[in-house]
Image (spheres, rainbow, N blue to C red):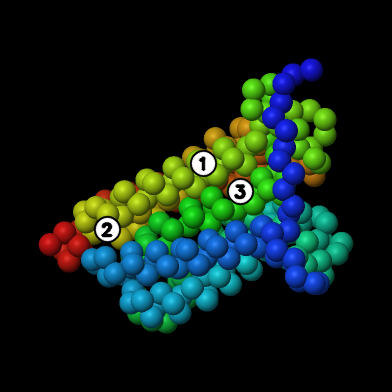
């Protein structure tokens, strides 16, 4: 028997009052949106200003809708299309779980394009400030995955391996924590350093590109330790669905970086 760390018995319900239940996963979404909103209001004021605080407040509503609708639709289309073809009404059962980051990201992109067009704002400039706060939600979401004992890692003999309640008797990587570190802490630190540099802010789209490449690489690495979804398994050549969906993100991010670097800098940012 290999020594393993006992999985902490964490109740997936964070707060329960009568029939009302607030789960850690829902709390992660709420916390990520509220904290991101608070920070985005301050970042958007940095020159060149991306939006007023009132415009950020208005944008949050549409961004939230993009996260929820895009995340759910992405899960349905990317991860379980066959199941929902036979029971399409269950696609509306968001309380049953099942959200896709890649779908949520596409939902946010659509929401931002729609909002900035209506308000006459630069979509790249606003997107640069929004992506800077996204890792907050990613970090909290991965911690919620860990608390729920879901999306566990592959079987491993590392000293910190854990036996997850629904993951069988084998010790596994706590890959949720790896992803919280890579997608949350590391990516957030990188973006917060870059957004403080006037020359970076002066090139709209550059931070968005860095985020896409950074998240894509973090997801590629994290998926090495994460057990693929049981109903999908490995797609081909040992690639998971999460890795496959991250490849176009990296390509799009690289294009945004090259595009931003090839255009003149905004003079109001660099003085």
Please, is residue 256 above or below residue 121 in the view?
A: above
Q: Which residue lies furthest to the top in this view?
A: 1
Q: In the rendered view, does 220 fall on the left or right side of 23?
A: left
Q: Which residue lies furthest to the left in this view?
A: 271
Q: x and y percent of residue 93 in the render? A: 78, 67
CA distance separating discs 2 and 1: 25 Å
Q: x and y percent of residue 114 in the render? A: 47, 75
Earlier-in-chain disc, 3 versus 1: 3
Looking at the picture, tell me which residue is in the foreground, 203 or 190. 190
- Helix, strand or loop for disc 3: helix
Per the image, the residue denoted by label 1 is 181
Per the image, the residue denoted by label 3 is 143
Sort mark 3 into few (<14), some (14-19) or many (20+) by Cα contacts within 10 Å: many
Please, is residue 262 above or below residue 91 in the view?
A: above
- Helix, strand or loop for disc 2: helix
Looking at the picture, tell me which residue is in the foreground, 17 or 265. 17
Per the image, the residue denoted by label 2 is 201
Earlier-in-chain disc, 2 versus 1: 1
Q: Which of marks 2 and 1 is in front?
A: 1
Q: In which quarter of the image is residue 207?
A: bottom left
Q: x and y percent of residue 200 in the render? A: 26, 53
Sort mark 2 into few (<14), some (14-19) or many (20+) by Cα contacts within 10 Å: many
CA distance separating discs 3 and 1: 10 Å
């Amino acid at each position: 028997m290999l020594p393993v760390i006992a999985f902490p018995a964490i109740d997936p319900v964070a707060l329960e009052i009568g029939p009302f239940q607030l789960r850690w996963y829902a709390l992660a979404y709420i916390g990520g949106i509220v904290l991101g909103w608070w920070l985005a209001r301050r970042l958007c004021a940095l020159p060149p200003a991306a939006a007023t605080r009132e415009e950020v407040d208005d944008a949050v509503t549409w961004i939230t809708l993009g996260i929820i609708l895009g995340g759910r639709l992405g899960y349905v289309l990317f991860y379980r299309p066959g199941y929902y073809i036979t029971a399409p009404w269950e696609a509306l059962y968001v309380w049953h779980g099942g959200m896709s980051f890649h779908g949520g990201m596409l939902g946010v992109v659509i929401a931002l394009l729609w909002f900035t067009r209506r308000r006459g704002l630069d979509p790249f400039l606003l997107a640069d400030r929004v992506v800077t706060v996204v890792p907050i939600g990613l970090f909290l979401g991965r911690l919620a995955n860990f608390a729920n004992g879901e999306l566990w890692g592959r079987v491993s003999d590392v000293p910190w391996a854990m036996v997850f309640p629904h993951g069988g008797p084998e010790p596994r990587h706590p890959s949720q924590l790896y992803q919280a570190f890579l997608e949350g802490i590391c990516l957030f630190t990188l973006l917060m350093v870059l957004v403080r540099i006037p020359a970076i802010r002066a090139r709209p789209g550059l931070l968005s590109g860095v985020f896409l490449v950074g998240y894509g690489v973090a997801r590629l690495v994290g998926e090495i330790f994460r057990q693929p979804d049981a109903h999908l398994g490995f797609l081909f050549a040992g690639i998971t669905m999460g890795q496959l969906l991250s490849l176009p993100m990296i390509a799009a991010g690289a294009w945004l970086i090259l595009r931003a670097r090839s255009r003149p800098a905004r003079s109001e940012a660099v003085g």
